[in-house]
Image (cartoon, rainbow, N blue to C red):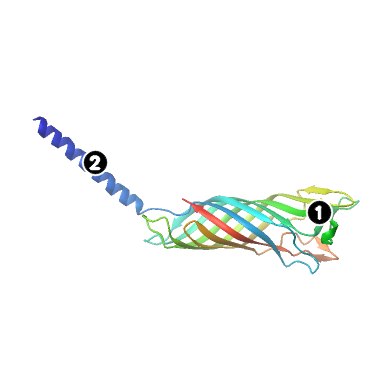
Amino acid sequence: MRVVFVLFLSLLSYQSILGQDVTTVETDKLYREDQFYFGVTYNLLGKMPQEMSQNGFSSGFHLGFIRDMPINKSRTLAFGLGLGYSANSFNQNLLISKNQQGEFAYEILESASFTKNKFSTHLVELPFEFRWRSSNAESYKFWRIYSGFKLGYVFASTSKFNGPPENIKLKNIDYFEKIQYGLTLGVGYNTWNAYLYYALNPIFKNEAKIDGKSIDINAIKIGLIFYIL
């Protein structure tokens, strides 16, 4: 009798394990990829006026969450919609100051006339991506190409100048364009992925001018992006 009881328990345990395996397999068929991201970039300025130039290292840090939404049975194609944060600095020779009337003024400097000159922005971002990857439920190493569009809102901005005749530090500059948007591309294998962002609109509003001409510079970000489940 004891032997029969032991065999009965063993059978129940086997059925339980088998059921769990089936559930796991079914769950794996509904896997999602790359929900969190972290990126570092080298920031460039496009469409600069003739005498404007960058100096030093301009950096960007980006992180956030993207909801992965597969659209085919093999789950190699998907849309991604998310929420993120981005901090960016741009070292260059465009001085931002205030005149005696309290209005913002802009001037291109000679590089030898200062020790530091940069402006920085902090954004809340909404990334949207169309995703292709060679992934499956069992492998975490695969190729990916993620192209998309990113919409950002500049919630804080600063400008810092160190040099004669005095140091200048400004916050929340009115003439920064609050809404930023551009195209994105992430390409890579496994952990390492190249990343590109190209802004489709200027960093400054039309009211920011030098010699009567609007400052139409835009942001270009090149670097690495890391995805985590």
Binning the other alpha carbons within 10 Å of mark 1 as few (below 14), some (14 to 19) or many (20 upward) gives few
132 or 60, nearer to the observer: 60
Query: Regarding mark 2 in the picture, which secondary structure is present there?
Result: helix
Identify the amino acid type marked 1.
Thr
Which residue is pictured at 35% across the width and 54% down the height?
29
* Quarter holding residue 194: bottom right
Binning the other alpha carbons within 10 Å of mark 2 as few (below 14), some (14 to 19) or many (20 upward) gives few
User: Residue placed farthest to the top in the image?
Assistant: 2
The percent coordinates of residue 143 (x first, y second) are 45, 62
**Marking on residue 115:** 1
Which residue is pictured at 65% across the width and 59% down the height?
42
Q: Judge depth for marks 1 and 2 and give the one in front.
A: 1
Please indicate whether residue 62 sits to the left or right of residue 6 in the image.
right
Identify the amino acid type marked 2.
Ser
Q: Please report whichever mark, 1 or 2, sits nearer to the chain's N-terminal start.
A: 2
Q: What's the distance in space between the residues labelled 1 and 2, CA to CA?
A: 70 Å
165 or 45, nearer to the observer: 165
* Quarter holding residue 196: bottom right
Query: Regarding mark 1 in the picture, which secondary structure is present there?
Result: loop
The percent coordinates of residue 65 (x first, y second) are 53, 50
Residue beneath label 2, please?
16
The percent coordinates of residue 50 (x first, y second) are 79, 69
Which residue is pictured at 21% across the width and 42% down the height?
15
